[in-house]
Image (spheres, helix red, strand yellow):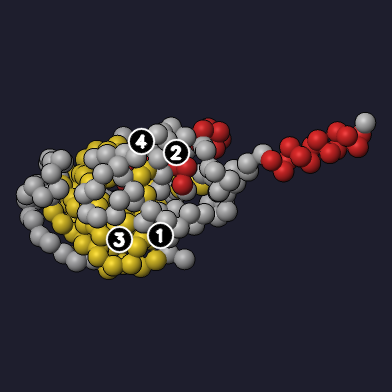
Amino acid sequence: MKFTLYCLLVILITITPMVSAVHNEEKGPEKFGRYVFKEQDIDAATKACDAGEKPGPEFVPTVRDKEPNLALLKDAKAEASSLLGGWCPQRHCTEYLNDGFYNNCRSWIIGAVPGWAQIDIGEVANVNRIIFGSDHSQGFTDRMAADFDILVATKIADANSEANTWENVYTHKGAPISKTTEITFDDVEARWLRIHIRKNADARIDEIEIYGGNDPFAVEPTDKLTTVWGQIKINN
């Protein structure tokens, strides 16, 4: 009898898909000075996750290098021009662009190109870098963005990425973005930050992080419009 129960347990363990994290990022603080972040309930995220036997949800930092992640502010909102159908809520929802969890089952996938994903921070802030990737765990290495612009706006998030309310702060036409990657650019004021994808059908973004210093809300909004070119580096 004991042997039979042991065999059944082994079989169940063998055939049950495992949802696991591979980087083991720690949960960040819920507050950073005047900045209050979204709740990160990893148990609920893991329960809802259809990981496909790949790594499950992992924490995205609320604070990185002593700077608040503006995309994870309590009132920050994710929006997108389209969404790959048939998966949400198990995977690939628009709200997963800034839900506080990395990896494929907590990612967004574009439905039609050209198109875009954006974060409404909620108010104007100083911004000078973003971080995103296709799949933080690298359990999947497909569906990468390689041809895109980073745009910002302070007053109107026009659906048309070519509208003059948008400012282009970075253009990328090169190596596909697979790993979690940091892109930096000159300080700029923004309420909305958009990644406009031109050609990469079914491109995936597992999380957008936005940073602009240790107190990015301490800015004076202006009407200055410039185009600057960024620097890119990959976080190992």
Q: On screen, 49 above or below 194?
A: above
Local packing at callout 4 (Cα closer than 10 Å; few below 14, some 14-19, many 20+) is few
- The amino acid pointed to by label 4 is Gly
Please tell me whether mark 4 or mark 1 is closer to you in this view: 4
> Which residue bears the numbered disc 3?
146
| Residue 218 seen from this side | no
If the image is split into quadrants, where does the N terminus sit? Answer: top right
Which sits earlier in the primary sequence, circle 4 or circle 3?
A: 4
Q: On screen, 108 above or below 137?
A: above
**Tag 3 secondary structure:** strand
Across and down, in percent, residue 133 comes to 39, 55
Which sits earlier in the primary sequence, circle 4 or circle 1?
A: 4
**Tag 2 secondary structure:** loop
Task: Describe residue 26's horizontal placement relative to residue 101 as left or right.
Answer: right
Q: How many marks?
A: 4
Q: CA distance from mark 3 to mark 1?
A: 9 Å
Please tell me whether mark 4 or mark 3 is closer to you in this view: 4
Across and down, in percent, residue 226 comes to 10, 60
Whether the residues at callouts 3 and 1 have beta carbons within 8 Å, the answer is no
Q: CA distance from mark 1 to mark 2?
A: 18 Å
> Which residue bears the numbered disc 2?
91
Q: Residue at x 42, y 56 (%)?
A: 142
Q: Residue at x 8, y 47 (%)?
A: 163
- The amino acid pointed to by label 1 is Ser
Q: CA distance from mark 4 to mark 3?
A: 22 Å
Which sits earlier in the primary sequence, circle 2 or circle 4?
A: 4
> Which residue bears the numbered disc 4?
85
**Tag 4 secondary structure:** loop
Across and down, in percent, residue 231 comes to 27, 68
Which sits earlier in the primary sequence, circle 1 or circle 2?
A: 2
Local packing at callout 3 (Cα closer than 10 Å; few below 14, some 14-19, many 20+) is some
- The amino acid pointed to by label 3 is Ala
